[in-house]
Image: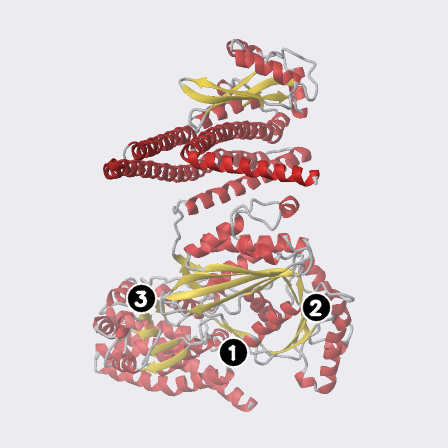
Amino acid sequence: MDLDNVRGNMQGKSTALRFKISEFTIRFSLQIAVLLMVTGIVSAYFFLSSTTKSLTNHTSELNAQRYLEALSAFRTLYTNEVVNTAKKQNITISHDYKNIKNAIPLPATLSMALGKEIGKFQSGAQTFLYSRYPFPWREQENKTIFSQDFSQQAWDSLTKNPEQAFFRFEEVNGQMAIRYAIADVMREGCIDCHNNHAQTPKDDWKLGDVRGVMEVILPVDKAQLTAQSSLKATFIVLFAMIVLITLVLFIFVSRIKKDAKKLADSNVEMMNKQEQVNFANEEMGLAIEQLELKASELISSNQVKADFMATMSHEIRTPLNGVIGMLSLLKQSEMTHEQNHHAHLATVSASSLLNIINDILDFSKIEADKLVIESVEIRLAELVSNLSSTMAHIAHEKDLELIVDVSQLKHVVTKGDPHRIRQILTNLISNAIKFTTQGEVVISTKIETIDEKHLQFSCSVTDTGIGIAQNKLDSMFERFTQEDSSTTRQYGGTGLGLAIVKKLCQLMNGDITVTSTQGQGSTFSFTLLLESCDTLKAELPQVDLSAYKILIVDDNKTNREVLYGQLKLWGADVSQADNAKTAFSSLTENFAKASESNFDIAILDMQMPEMNGAQLGQIIRAYKQFENLKLIMLTSLARPGDAQYFANLGFDFSLPKPVITADLAHALIQTANSSEPTSQQKLLPASANNKKITIKPLPKSTRVLLVEDNAINQIVAKTLLTNLGAQVEIANNGEEALACLEKDYFDVILMDCQMPIMDGYTATRAIRNSQRDYNDIYIIAMTANAMSGDREKCINAGMNDYLTKPVDIIALENSLLNALNMSLEELESVSPTQTEQDITSKDNAINTADESNSDQIWGKGEFYKRVGQNQQLAERIVAMYCQDIPGEIDKLTQAMTAKDIKSIEAIAHKIKGSSANLEAKKLAQCALEIELDVKENNCVDIESLSIKLKDNFAELLVELEEFLAINVQDE
């Protein structure tokens, strides 16, 4: 019972206490709320003020620490990489280097000079280096520095505890700054120099001794101080608002208690006070706008920092280029092996640093929108192939296959920025090689037409390397990003490469993506929008392999597919084998089935499991049944002597990987067409296979209009053009040529100058003056005249180029390639272009290839070359000549009797052209002399020359009829 009473009393007291507290809270709620607000604002002010000040101090301390660390790192790098190398080269190192020839500064001297230069750009930063053991030339400077209290305290503190930096904040030159000092300890590379220097104040230095103090005075960022002031102003405004609101509420409550009748007036007064509160809120809004303005200034400050980074990268790169240049000159001088090794290491280190700086500079340019993309002609296949070849040795040193597929680059030439495309490819290929330890790196390319002015270049770089985690793919193109920190430690790099690549792709209206499976490899694919070249029909040379059966032996599937695709494009019958055993079985089975369909060429890879390409080649050469099989070796690591080594094993040709299209075409043509071994080839048994590979340098879509009235010249010119790969249509004179242009499209016109009805000059002027689409067509003059001034006459008529008859095949090929905006450099063999020779007299009128044979009646060998060793064509031209020329000689005789000068010149011109194409140079010379005499109005010698012409033709006719008789008998 008593317990119940106690419990009841306690509950009653508790209830009463809660009631009193509730009553007190309600009664003094206004005062409590104001007190809590004031307390909260004051607490927030002191907390934020303290936090801001602490953050400002910490930022200043961190900036000063990084500043000195960077300066110290530069000093260490300079000591290790430059001073040590200079000492070995006996280069003077002195504080007075400016007054000593060929001297470089001491590390401390250079560090202080660098600090002074940096201070010009970093808000007045000041750098000091002082010690209680100064060299004589720094005693006075050190004495002045140690007169300061901070310097003495810093020395005392750092000598006791070198690992702990000493700093404090104080006002310097009217501005708040941090004075930050660290110990300058003795490094291993400096002990010998300090202990043995002639003027050293202390000669018992040991590793780790505190030899001095490095101090920086770094002004506190004005933006941070301004932020503190703004924060203080904001809290003052808030506090004033609280006081004002409290006063209004106090007056309002007091008026209610004193006089209820004045409630209405109090409400009006409250509204007035509310307006004041709104005004105060507007002031607070202005303060917020000021804060936003300060934020904008901070963004601008970041831009300034980016510009500063670009400037500093440039300023650092300039002396670094000087260092690399001097090292290059140093390496060219006589040095010991050790000195040369050290110079090489210094060059590699400087080049690596230069690459990093270049990346930073490129990124800064991109960020500042200052990177300019060029638009010049690019040969894409050549660019990709050459770049891959230069990087192949890096892949081969790691036993990687570097595979390049440019077979889809039908448009060889486009317009874009070759330097930036090369930069993108270099970054992606080097990354692929770097992160791949085994397997392959495949570069695949293609190009697509977007519209008549634009092409899209697509390229992918695929590797079988470490791969990338799926959750890291989205961040791979962010700056300073690699997959994880262990990647940076193991493989190196700044993390800027892919960020720069993505920016470059976007600047060229493209993009880059990545797909990857961790542990299996990655594929980086990018696209670029390039401009098309309107005047170009750039296609690969027409290599004709339709008569060939080729076997590819390679354990790498990708390699086989690339080779298979290219060989099929050239018309070959291609088979594949993934190892030596399968290849030999294919050769044996094929030989057993039918000898006429045996393999003609086998392309073997050197590096294959179980049995390599060299061993397979030796086995093949051991079997007589395969003696006619041509062997080509593909090798990853091309070393001096490899060609001779493989030739001794029986190989006809060896190619380094990656296999470039032009190199492959050259190897196939050289292997199949060469009847004699080169100096690097072993003589193989004579082959019964007489098939030849032909290469037609012109695109197969090339259409040529041949304007020529002489039937023999028509046949010869058409044969030459067809052999070069062109489609030919013939017009007998200028009038027919104009009619042909109205009906069909042509790329080039080969225009004879002297023709009946309408000559070449008149026809050319008519074409140029027309308003048709063909008025700018490329016209090549063909004339039997080689007189001085003839070329100018053709050019003035509107022709683009000039060839003399008989037309030389190389000169014709060069001229046509130039007309199509192509180059002989794209082909595997280049012959010099025949140059024009002015003829000023009869003595040198006919230019012969061999002066000793200038008197021969018929140059049959040269004639065979002109018709491409085509026996039937040779017989046809000779027969036409024997049939036509007697009639022309009779006409010449009649014209001479009638003294018809114009007809004499025209007939002599025709005889000269036909005879020159037949390589009947003696007769052509005689006809030319008649033509020249007519032009010079020298009619005295024409009759004797006419007799000489008939005699020469009689001698020539004997040889030609004998030639025709022999060949008819053979048939």
Residue 887 sits in which quadrant? bottom left
Q: Is residue 656 above or below residue 888?
A: above
Residue at (51, 11) in percent of width and height: 148
Label 2, secondary structure: give it: loop
**Mark 3 nearby-residue class (10 Å; few <14, some 14–19, many ≥20):** some
Any part of residue 744 in sight: yes
Instruction: Residue under label 1, please give it.
Output: 869
Front-most of residues 330 and 609: 609
**Side (left or right) of 256 relative to 199:** left
**How far apart are labels 2 and 1 at the CA level?**
41 Å
Of marks 2 and 3, the one in the foreground: 2
Front-most of residues 175 and 686: 175
Residue at (28, 75) in percent of width and height: 754
Residue 647 position, x and y percent, is 70, 64
Q: What is the quadrant of the N terminus in the image?
A: top right
Residue at (74, 82) in percent of width and height: 589
For the image, the number of numbered tags is 3
Instruction: Residue under label 2, please give it.
Output: 555
Residue 344 position, x and y percent, is 62, 38
Q: Earlier in the sequence, mark 2 or mark 1?
A: 2
Please name the amino acid that badge 1 sits on. Answer: Gln
Instruction: Residue under label 3, please give it.
Output: 800
**Mark 1 nearby-residue class (10 Å; few <14, some 14–19, many ≥20):** few
Residue 601 sits in which quadrant? bottom right
Residue 202 position, x and y percent, is 65, 12
